[in-house]
Image (tube, grey):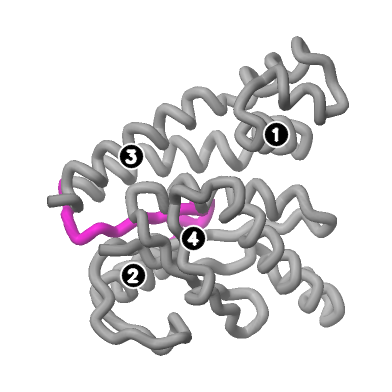
Amino acid sequence: MVAVVTCDIIKSRQYSNNDRGTVNDLIKSAFEETIELLPNTNVDKLSFNIVQGDEFQFIVNTPALAYRFIVFYRLRLALKNLKSSFRAGIGFGEVAVDNDNSYKMDGPAFHRSRDAFQKFGKPKFRNRITHVISGNQELDDQIEIIAMYNDFIEQRWSIKQRNSIYLYEKYGSLKEAAKHDSVSLQALQQRIKVSGYSQMDFGFFKHTILVNSILQP
């Protein structure tokens, strides 16, 4: 059981041809940095592929942590010089056809990831940035509530809030994070509190428990 993640860069048409090449490089570097930040997600580096400049896909071998990985991947990418972001469709399931290129692989996880990604084309989902399909309707209904709430919080993060959250996750404590930020410990605490990250972190926890209860034997 894995999670397949299919993504595309938001408002990619705004980038010039030169910037598109830069965006590709930033997508790759942010991907590597997020893997280092969240090693427990067990992301398959070799599965990462970019197509048509703005769509990319990869496999997460610990499916319950795929959603958390996506949020921090977006956070890290937004801190790069072009401040890019992306939408992500996550699909849980098996891999039926293996290959060194994820776009040549097949199986339920890939079908569900694509179905989740295609939901962004519906008008009622135009402001969403995360969709998850597991194949279990009861689970999907509960995850949808979590993802909708977390999308709302995440899209309102400022660059300063994103940086403070990233440093907090990277160094494991507010005190250590403050040493690498441009604000005092008290200011950093307030910045993270106002961001709503603690509520979102609880959403990650609840999501992980839900997925593990259904997907793991």
Q: CA distance from mark 4 to mark 1?
A: 23 Å
**Of marks 4 and 3, the one in the foreground:** 3
Q: Residue at x 45, y 86 (%)?
A: 100
Q: Earlier in the sequence, mark 3 or mark 1?
A: 1
Query: Closer to the camera: disc 2 or disc 3?
Result: 3
Read off the magenta span.
122-138
Q: Residue tagged by mark 3?
A: 207
Going by the numbered disc 2, the residue's amino acid type is Asp
First reached walking from the N terminus: tag 2 or tag 3: 2
**Residue shown at 69% from the left, 70% from the top:** 12
Q: Quadrant of the N terminus?
A: bottom left
Q: CA distance from mark 4 to mark 2?
A: 11 Å
Q: Residue 3 at what x, y percent from top left?
A: 35, 62
Horizontal arrangement in the rendering, residue 98 relative to residue 117 (left or right): left
As drawn, the label of residue 167 is 1
- Cα separation, mark 1 vs mark 2, equals 34 Å
Mark closer to the chain start, 4 or 3: 4
Three-letter amino acid code at disc 4?
Answer: Ala
